[in-house]
Image (cartoon, rainbow, N blue to C red):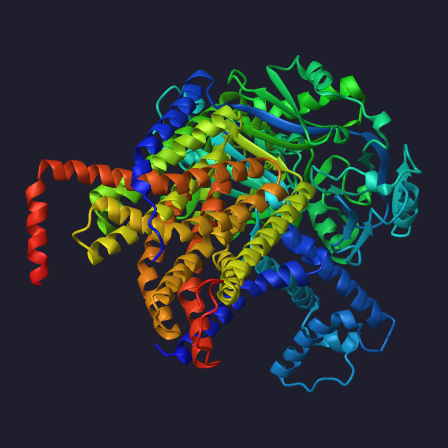
Amino acid sequence: MNKTKRFIIVLVVLAVAFAFLLPSIQWYALTPKEDQALALGSREQIREFAWRMARTDLAEIERLVASSDAGPLPERFAPVVSRAKKIYKAVGITAPETWNAKAFLAAFDNRNDALAELEDYHRARVLSLKKLHGSAVQLGLDLSGGMSVVIRADLEALEAKTGKPLSPAERDDAVVRAVEVLNNRIDKFGLTEPVIRRQGEDRIYVEIPGAADPERINGIIMGRGRLAFHIVDEEATASLTAYLETNPLAINDDMKLSDPSLIPADTIVRKYYTKDKYGLDEWTGSYMVIKAEAGLDGNHIESATVSSDPVTGQPEVVFSLDKEGGELFYALTSANVDKTMAVVLDDRVRTGARISGPIQANVKITGFAADEANNLALILRSAALPVELIVESQQAIGASLGEDSILEGRNAILIGLIAVFVFMLVYYKGAGVNAAIAQVLNLYLMFSILSAFNLTLTLPSIAGFVLTIGMAVDANVIIFERIKEELREGKGRKAALEAGFNKAFWAVMDGNITTIIAALFLSQLGTGSIQGFAVSLAIGNMSSLFTALFVSRLLFDFNTDVFKHKAVSISWRVK
Amino acid sequence: MKRVIKFHKAFLPAVIGSAILITVGLVGLLTMGLNLGVDFQAGINQSVQLAFPAADVSYDGAGSPVLSIGEDTLSVVFSGAEVESRTASWDLRTVGTVADLASAMKAEGLTMSIRDGAGLSADLLVPTYQGDYTLGKGSVLVHRGPKSDAEIYGSIESIREAVSGIGSVSVQSVGAESSMQYMIRISDDGMDKAFSEKMPALIRSALESKFGTGKVVTIKTDYVGARFSKDLSDSAWKLTLFTSLAILAYATIRFKLQYGLGAVLAILHDGLIMVGFIVWTRMEFNTTSIAAILTILGYSINDTIVIFDRIREDRKLDPGAKLSAVIDKSVTETLGRTIITTLTTMLAVFSLYIFTSGSIKDFALALLVGMVSGTYSTVFIATGFVHLWENIKNKRQPKPATGQMVAKPAH
């Protein structure tokens, strides 16, 4: 391969690496903290934010219309105005000269369309920031602060309770139920979006970035899911919904109203949820006013299954109640025929069903898609057969400790790098510059690979990088020593370089491949921190192969052919 | 040509020396055992700091801003639908006294009512270790460290006394005495299923009843359950075994069986030396230590392979030479590289050792020891084994080896 080709390859690699690094630079250096805080919120919080912002914005625009203000809209509306412009264009109306409130509203058929557009804008903006965060290098809990918990679903206890061994499907179902309960309650954390992942057969991994207060978090995670049936106050629901349309800030995150007299005294407000396409809870954007006192507690449920209606084939959820529950349910349904009954799990309304008549032991709920029916049955079963959860391991690290660790890691990398540079420059003179450039590129490539594969940066992985800086020089050293030997034998610059690189090639490859083998095995040792270290070690080894064998060679050849160097500046003794 | 150093003469003394060191290590391991860290022993590790309640911070405006105090800065992030998004931050080193900070925060609508130490430097404020506080009408308590040595209270003994009623406890002090930071470890005997949930609150209340309400700040909490730690030690053994086997397989394919065995012997040597070091220094043995050992396996194998590669090459150049002479020549030729690589890697690891703290510092120290052992074992143990193997083989069947040599010159 000629030099130009190799040079182009190096440039392409550098450019691709930069493209991978870009999201990290944008997120960590260019996104203001307050936007970061918004984007790190859970999807529900973002939804809520967009919901409120849209209503606040629209209220302001309507006020401007009412006061017949013909001046252009304030600057902060510019992005939504450009959306309105598109609508004008699509319908074929000439755009007005000044974009005032009236002209803006005229783009929409009705108030709801305008609201939907505004909500969509705010949501899309925060979600795109969230996406940016997702493609940037992630900081591990030890650097960002936060808490991770490994929880085990106690299947033995469940077997003891049911009195028979569980089939594999039942075991699986039990863990799925436990994940469901966790999903349901863990969203309640302040700032950041939690991670809930199933690990192996019966373990669940939970990570909550930012928060590091085990006393508070344990209470929320380990408390049992509480399922109950509440009767819905439909009049109050309708009037509250109408009121909130124009006064979105009248309700806070804890679903407390600023004016409690808006709803009857014996009722409370709860949000209505569905599952989104990823199986995560999603707030529908609507509130329900329900009786504060539960009509029936979920622990009366004995079983819940999904079947299909023999006539219509529609899926239906059937659940049975114990004797006491059946009597209570009969009384409840008799008194509330034609009203709606809400199924509430941990303060979230999961579904509402109309009571068609008095019901005793076996309850049938119809009118869903198959997915929804399965979800509801799962929730009902989680109340019937609660799975006990046991904390297997737990780690909580404060954010400020994380900042200290980042500083420590940065210093270790910088000083390590400088020490190695100085050594290489003193020992290898001109060729040392070559090795130094290769090292800087190596570090750059390592971070970009980390970013490209969305890996997590932890303190151990920084340690891996520092170690790699030292070890990666090895490839250069092997090659340089070889070149020196060739020079001692009296070869000229070109021949010595050629022979040095060729003869050192397999020594470098073998050495690095064995290290990579060790690193890959290491990365299999379950816990995250060791994994991070091993992965960064493997990445560093691979990128150092590239820089030592390819980039450094190119630099030598460049000096030979372009700057017409005849001698090799590689040692104090060998000329 | 450089003078060839007669390395092969040192093989026997080296083996004896290594055997003694490893035996000492193993004796330590059997008599004292490892100082197992939280990863391998069921229990809770809670780091706490004793401090003084300094001020209550509250906020009466719209939205819920988030307060976070770092080592040098205090920042409040306003975001959400109700407020104009912004971040207010103050440098604790330059803002002046706590009272100055309070008046600066007033301008942002934040109320900081000082309980104690208004005239002290704001730099004394304790970071918000347990995550950031969401501010609202209810107040949030921030702490400060001691203003002088005279204010320091608490000691390992007093902490142990306070929490001894909870379970089997060990207490260590973290950092300087003036920081009043301690690590409390309580082991979990598995009797109480809710151990991990109850313990943080129990520790806190025990300390508060001894030292006063609001005087205890939790820094971090780690908990590992019995089953988890067992799984971890199982996988650690498997890992070391499979890594060695994989390296053996690769080295056998690329070289010959005796080279593969020599390489694995050398890395096992390094692993045992490191275990001995960890045992005798009473360094905590945790997942990071396993990582250090496995890293040295990778590092040492790299070293070994480079020398083997050279031995193979030199043998091809001069097939008639005695193996001991070839080994001496190859090791001498690669000696420069061996020393320089060890030096550069040590420079980097040394920087890690100086700048980090806690388990990563131990990790760096273990690596330094492993590196010395790795370099030494490459030169003396791995090549020594190959030498021994071929000597034995040649004694058993000396004829074919010479027979082949006659055929070569005709080529």
- Residue A396, picture quadrant: top right
In which quadrant of the rendered image does the C terminus of chain B lie? bottom left
Q: Which residue is depicted at the point 80% across and 59% down?
A: B84
Where residue B409 appears, as percent x and y from the top left, is 10, 60
The relative height of residue B74 versus residue B232 in the rendered view (above or below) is below
Give the camera-side residue of A182 and A134: A134
Above or below for A191 versus A16:
above
Q: Is residue B250 visible?
A: no
Give above or below for A330 relative to A365: above
Q: How many marks?
A: 0
Q: Is residue A420 left or right of residue B164?
A: left
Is residue B407 in sight in this rendering? yes
Q: Quadrant of residue A183?
A: top right
Picture residue at 68% right of the left edge, 76% below the top: A82
B262 left or right of A83 in image: left
Residue B276 at x, y percent in the picture = 44, 27
Asked if residue A420 lies left or right of residue B266, the reply is right
